Image (spheres, rainbow, N blue to C red):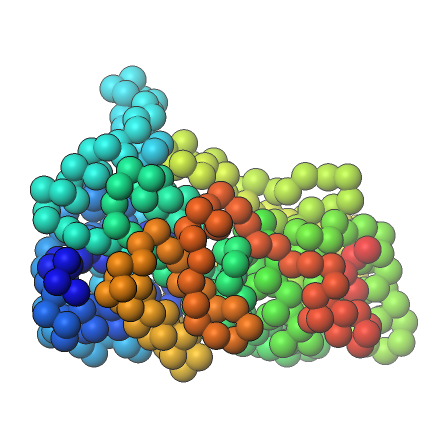
Amino acid sequence: MAALKRIGILTGGGDCPGLNAVIRAVAKSALAGGLEVVGIMDGYLGLIEDRMHPLSYEDVSNILTVGGTILGSSNKANPARYAVPDGRGGWTIRDVREEVVATCRRAGLDALVVIGGDGTMSGAHELVRRGLNLVGVPKTIDNDLCETEITFGHHTAVATASDALDKVHTTASSHHRVMVVELMGRYAGWLALHAGVASGADVILIPEIPFDLEKVAKTCADRRKVGKGFTIVAVGEGAKPVGGKQFVDHVVADSPDPIRLGGVGKFVAEQVEKLTGLDSRSIVLGHVQRGGTPTSFDRLLATRFGYHAFRLLQDGRFGRLVVQQKGEITSVLISDVAGKVRTVPGDYDAVLAARAIGTCFGD
């Protein structure tokens, strides 16, 4: 402990429930251990623009149940590829990693706790390579970070998505419709799969299993023939038809990850109606999946992750990411997860269970 006097905390990437619980656990543990704690605003952007402030015990009290992050976040500020206006209506990409390191040195930060997903951890890996003492905490509603069984925020997002799918059931039944609900998840299907199974969706479409529209349409038509007047389709935003590409909603030019997926739900609903004549509607659940009060599961997991991150700092075990493996909290090298995406295996038990009870995956 004597080697550490001042630490910084930042939350990178998209927001999710449980971020404040991690901030609280790290900050309170560190403050109780005699350390100064600094909150870095808006993720890596705060390091790039040198925006940070001390965190007191009062600052991190009563935030356990609050969604979002008191520190703010940014999913555009990658120090390796930071976009700045070029004065001609476009963008110039700069590498500001050395500047970020210099900012940390000037601020007297002996170590950083970086809370984020795969993009944030890829950035963290680059800062570790440049000599910063750093530990990571895995955050994403998508649950797509490698080397960990679960990321905090996913459980709450599944609960939110499941609740929405439950509500869609009643209107689908009343109007005898095919209702297609597009969920987040990017290139991994964990959120659509877990919410779909939990809500009893009749069709679940995920990026890992390209779908055949004819088979999806047949499932909807067959249900009508046996007296099932409606069909619920849960589709991950990264799902794609066999031989086709993922659907891109728009491109964000000044983002290091410019592709924003979206549109597959509308496509599926339109094609099912065309192929079957069944009245079909699509819904994009969107950012509501990121919001709200974290579930008790996520509050507990985030607190455990935050405490373990503090222990890694305390023990001088830098360059590591807190993870859960076989139900236990442990850690791995950040380099082991940087630049990788954890996807749903074809033999995952939730997939097998869903198939066994008749759920269609479009294959």
- Whether residue 40 appears in this view of the structure is yes
Check the image and name the residue furthest to the bottom: 296
- Whether residue 282 appears in this view of the structure is no
Could you tell whether 6 is left or right of 47 in the image?
A: left
- Residue drawn 33% across the image and 75% down it: 303
- Residue drawn 45% across the image and 37% down it: 258
Check the image and name the residue furthest to the top: 88
Q: Is residue 70 above or below residue 110?
A: below
Among the 4 quarters of the image, the one containing residue 355: bottom right
Q: Is residue 313 above or below residue 354?
A: above
Front-lying residue, 62 or 30: 30
Front-lying residue, 115 or 360: 115
Could you tell whether 63 is left or right of 354 in the image?
A: left
The C terminus lies in quadrant: bottom right
- Residue drawn 26% across the image and 72% down it: 25
**Image position, residue 235 (x, y; %):** 65, 58
- Residue drawn 49% across the image and 43% down it: 339
**Image position, residue 48 (x, y; %):** 21, 39
Q: Is residue 328 above or below residue 344?
A: below
Front-lying residue, 294 or 226: 294
Among the 4 quarters of the image, the one containing residue 196: bottom right
**Image position, residue 338 (x, y; %):** 46, 46
**Image position, residue 238 (x, y; %):** 61, 49
Could you tell whether 310 is left or right of 274 in the image?
A: left
Front-lying residue, 177 or 112: 112
